[in-house]
Image: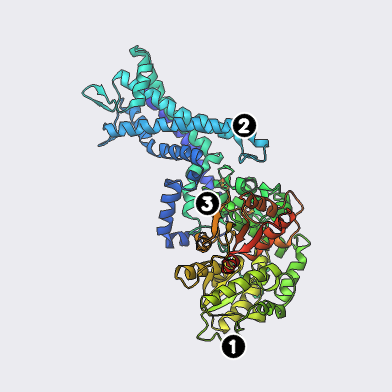
Amino acid sequence: MLSRIVVGLGISVVCFAVAGRRFFWLSKLIRSGKPAGRAWEGFRRAKEGVTAEIVEVAGQRKLLKWTVPGIAHFFTMWGFTVLLTTILEAYGALFVRDFAIPFIGRSNWLAFVEDFFATAVLVSLVVFTAIRIKNAPARKDRASRFYGSHLGPAWLVLFMISMVIVTLLVYRGAQINTGYFPFTTDGVASPWAFASQFVAHALPSSPSVNNAVEYWGIIANIGVIAGFLVIVSYSKHLHIFLAPLNVAFSRRPRALGGLDKTPDMDMDNVTEDTVFGVGKIDDFTWKQMLDFATCTECGRCQSVCPAWNTGKPLSPKLLIMGLRDNMFASADRLLSGSSDGAVDTLVPSIIDPDVLWSCTTCGACTEQCPVDIEHVDAIIDMRRYEVLMESRFPSEAGLLLRNMENQGDPWGLGGSKRTEWLGALDFDVPIIEDTIPDDVEYLYWVGCAGSLDERGRQQVVSTARMLHRAGVTFGILGPRESCSGDPARRFGNEYLFQEMAKANIETLNAVGTKKIVASCPHCFNTIKNEYPALGGDYEVIHHAELLTHLVKNGRLRPGFNYKGTVTYHDPCYLGRHNRIILEPRTVLAAIPGVTQVEMGRCREKGFCCGAGGARMWLEENIGKRVNMERTEEALGTGADIVSTACPFCMIMLDDAVKANGKGDEVAVMDISQVVEKSLG
Ligand code: SF4
Ligand code: SF4
């Protein structure tokens, strides 16, 4: 007995010391990051944090979206949690052969629960093994979500988990045969411990063999658990401990919508030490460093990324892994706090420029990530550094930035053109010059594409007509409206964004704006979610929301003049970023002749059109065009109208439909145009 105590505790002390040292080192490394403001935020929004822990961690919501691996992971995670009781029992058995946890340790229900989860974990491991064998060539297959993941360590972890369960069941089986099983009443081992009973029957009946198996089985179980702890602390399976922390400190309700940080761009506050954005790993916040350490390399983000799926070099998984590797490689410097010596910037030494500039900021990666990693903010942080500190960016963007700066719109057409679309209306729309009159309910934020692009204008003309028909009063800023700044911000030019945003806020405040209806999801997102940090607080809705309201109230009744099949493309900044998913479908459903068909990738899983993140104005020379990929999916539904609720999506999809030779058969329309079509 003494030897068992010495060996069991000896192994544990050594392994716990090694793992503990590693965790202490990791915690120091992560805390070396810049302040993130998340600790206070986490405290302030504790209720939402608790909900997230219940839904994301305990409920495994995101993982369960992928049914088979999701269920397997659910049982493995809960198996590990529930089987903590068996660790207590194993350590207790070092001292007392039939040790039982006080109060509950001899009950049939605990015997059943422990054996059930032990069996469930074993079955889950078989599922994981099958998935990994099926994906064996995955590391070299771009189509696989495991492309680029470290598969060797994953096999080791599967083996270690299986050994934890096997050694557990083996020593419990032996305990039944030696009469030292804790779940024993009147000399009869509980039949509810069904898996342990199965092993007991499989073992030889010899008492000496069972004594030896029990003795070494407990030591082996403790040894495997302690060894596993060490392996976890040095591997991607760190997520077992870090995921709940990362979820706890994540942005609420999700890291989508507005960007996380609004840096101080006041040039009066700039010193020679000021760094805009992230140039080297040292510039990331501790929360971002926690993100990097938490990545499980599961590849869910990679599998949904429009850039990766169209042959671009950007994989959000490989990007996060690259940053994590660089964080570990830079640990000595980070921990010493030394800024001595030249350090290569992340771009291009760690992150290829083509990787950085391929992102459309669609948020599909963040939406999918089961451990709430915030990819989009990290990408924009690096873009900010490239643009503001290094002036390194795709050359074609120079014109975009100059146009926005000088003319207030990406095309450089100027404010005087912003009212031309009004000529298509047979009613007057007030152009607000002084203050918004009391009888005008909404300020209609038309947006650059809606004001200046021919197809965008068709969208806003239809929207204006439908609002007017329903008796909604609205006015526009006309020449005083300027770009919301979204392309500049997503491109990384935070300075230009804030200049434009502040000018817009000044105008909006001067005319007494309270309620804004926007047609462009990018303007909608920016004004609603990002202007408040700069002093612009308004009630902002998208026209899809307003049309839904009008249709539901009976103020807008679609007609019978259109009959056909419509598929709806979710704009990323409306659907995924702002969860306006049902409203456009409600509007379409209100049109009697419309039959709706969904694309495979829809709603919060919608596939980007390729325009976001200022990509609309950048060359797309690598791989397949994103809009072609999306449009092929839309055409595959057989719909005769591809509808959407974003002028940029309309332009991208319309271009691709025409390039596909389907321009005469399939129309690309905003939902407001479909409503108008139904009215004849
Ligand atoms: S935001 Fe979209 S394009 Fe960018 S990395 Fe994530 S999934 Fe890919
Ligand atoms: S970033 Fe998230 S989704 Fe992507 S591989 Fe890592 S854990 Fe998986």
Residue denoted by label 1: 434
Residue found 69% across the figure and 62% down from its top: 651
User: What's the residue type where badge 2 is placed?
Assistant: Ala
Which residue ends up furthest to the bottom in the rendered image?
434
In which quadrant will I find the C terminus? Answer: bottom right
Q: How many marks?
A: 3
State the residue lying farthest toward the front.
Answer: 561
- The circle on residue 372 is 3
Q: Quadrant of the N terminus?
A: top left
What whole-number distance in Å separates the C-alpha atoms at marks 1 and 3?
45 Å
Q: Secondary structure at mark 3?
A: loop
Q: Amino acid at mark 3?
A: Asp
Between circles 1 and 3, the one closer to the viewer is 1
Contact flag, marks 1 and 3 (Cβ < 8 Å): no
Residue 177, position as x, y percentages in the image: 32, 18
Q: Is the residue marked 1 within 8 Å of ligand 1, measured from its CB? A: no
Q: CA distance from mark 2 to mark 3?
A: 27 Å
| Neighbourhood count class around disc 1 (C-alpha, 10 Å): few under 14, some 14–19, many 20 upward | few
Residue 32: quadrant of the picture: bottom right
Residue at which label 2 appears: 136
Q: Earlier in the sequence, mark 2 or mark 1?
A: 2
Using the rendered view, name the quadrant where residue 201 is placed.
top left
Q: Who is closer to the viewer here, 183 or 219?
A: 183
Please state the horizontal and vertical placement of residue 528, each as a whole percent of the image: 54, 69
Q: Residues within 10 Å of mark 2 (few under 14, many from 20)?
A: some
Sequence-first tag of 1 and 3:
3
Between 385 and 226, which is closer to the camera in this rendering?
Answer: 385
